[in-house]
Amino acid sequence: MPDIAMVTFHTKLFLRFSIRLMFYASLCLYACAIHAQQTGKKDNVQFKKIIITNDFVSEGVAVGDVNKDGKMDIMAGAFWFEAPNWVRHEIDNPKTFDPDTTFSNSFLNFSMDVNQDGWIDFIRVGFPGKELVWYENPKNKPGHWKMHTICSNIGNESPAFVDVDGDGRPDILCNDPVAKEVVWFKSPSVKGDTVWKRFVISKGDLATGIYTHGLGLGDINGDGRKDVIITKGWWEAPKNVTQTNWVFHPADLGDDCSQMYAMDVDGDGDMDVISASAHNYGIWWHEQIKDANGNIMFKQHEISKLFSESHGLALADINGDGYPDLITGKRYFAHNGKDPGAYEPSVLYWFQFVPGKMPTWVPHQIDNNSGVGLQVVVKDMNNDGLPDIVIGNKKGVFLFERVK
């Protein structure tokens, strides 16, 4: 005889899953219908998956024309991969890692011409609490790239590569868990300079832990200056962003998350915030509202709970309709199998934004065996005018090319 309690449990579990699946299917059909009415055309976005490597070398990735041959290359961890055949070259001493038991020394990667010599350089964010460094492009000369230290101790699991001071060059926004400071590093602005100037936003325990989650930059109060956003609220940018002790405004912006983006989701003229759970289920938008005294508050709305561990999130227009979409997925073994849903497929999705009084995001699965790392790069890699997606994580390095 079967165990009645066990049969009942599995029946309830099946029903719960079926209801959840039906809900998201209905939402998708509804949003697609609305989108078709608004655009008059059927969505037809497809991607071609290219495996750059199956080795775990980094959970970040960056792109740029490393060798100045006119083609976009991929940089990840200690390597760069030369387009179009993705030949592997070393940036530093070669390192690969065990995806099931360890973490890498490369959590996020960025690229820019740091010293403005005309060659793209590479920035590596190490394990939380460890080094932030940049590597100087050797200009096609053999050997490893020269490493320069920006900071010996960088915290927050989603340091932001954003233009804090509005000079047109990206800076690095993060924390220093040793000094207990929220800081930003201004990228060198004079040709030949290699010094990243450090400026303190706030001192103390708020958002200065090694493993702090959630960080973004955006104009929350509509004064034309970009504020610093965390899950506990936001620091109001002063007129002079190099000054310290920015004014902090407490607010509830949800659970621990990855990248945070400011966007007027509901079209009411003020900035809302988008975030995604780093180690649990949930992607949300936080609607900006006012309390009785006119103070800024936020109301959370769920976008999706299709998968967990969405530790990398990008905002970019995927289908060319003029609206920014969301690109994210599951970070494989973010806590080495200890997170909710850790053993579910490592999916990659883009969520099509459908604006309106009730804005929605239509989920589109791109892949089910890659996922994301700690960031998602969206860039036209083959100069065809379409956005491609580049990922680095514990399963390897992947390029997803938009196909016409």
Image: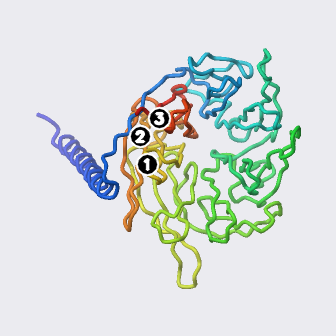
**Is residue 280 depicted above or below 58 in this figure?**
below
Q: Which mark is residue 281?
A: 1
Using the numbered discs, state the Cα–Cα distance from disc 1 to disc 3 in whole angstroms.
14 Å
Q: Are marks 1 and 3 in contact (CB under 8 Å)?
A: no
Residue 223 falls left or right of residue 404: right
Residue at the farthest left position = 1
Q: Where is 178 relative to 389, above or below?
A: below
Task: Identify the secondary structure beneath mark 1.
Answer: strand
Give whichever of discs 3 and 2 has the lower sequence position: 2
Quadrant of the rendered image containing residue 246: bottom right
- Residue 197 visible? The answer is yes
Residue 341 tag number: 2
Q: Residues within 10 Å of mark 3 (few under 14, many from 20)?
A: many
Using residue 4 as the reference point, say whether residue 317 is left or right of it.
right
User: Amino acid under label 1?
Assistant: Tyr
**Callout 3 touching callout 2 (CB < 8 Å):** no
The residue positioned 39% from the left and 56% from the top of the image is: 354
**Residue 124, x across and y down, in percent:** 71, 34
Query: Taking 346 as reference, is 67 left or right?
Result: right
Which residue is at the front of the view, 326 or 179? 326
Disc with the residue nearer the chain's start (1 vs 3): 1
- Report the residue at 74% width, 57% height from top: 166
The three-letter amino acid code for the residue at tag 3 is Gly
The disc, 2 or 1, on the residue closer to the chain's N-terminal end is: 1
Amino acid type of the residue tagged 2 in the rendering:
Gly
**Local secondary structure at mark 2:** loop
Give the distance between the C-alpha atoms of the residues marked 2 and 1, in whole angstroms: 8 Å
In front of the other: 26 or 255? 26
Report if the CB atoms under discs 2 and 1 are less than 8 Å apart.
yes
Real-space CA distance between mark 3 and mark 2, rounded to the nearest whole angstrom: 13 Å
Residue at 78% in and 14% down = 142
Q: Which residue is mark 3?
A: 371
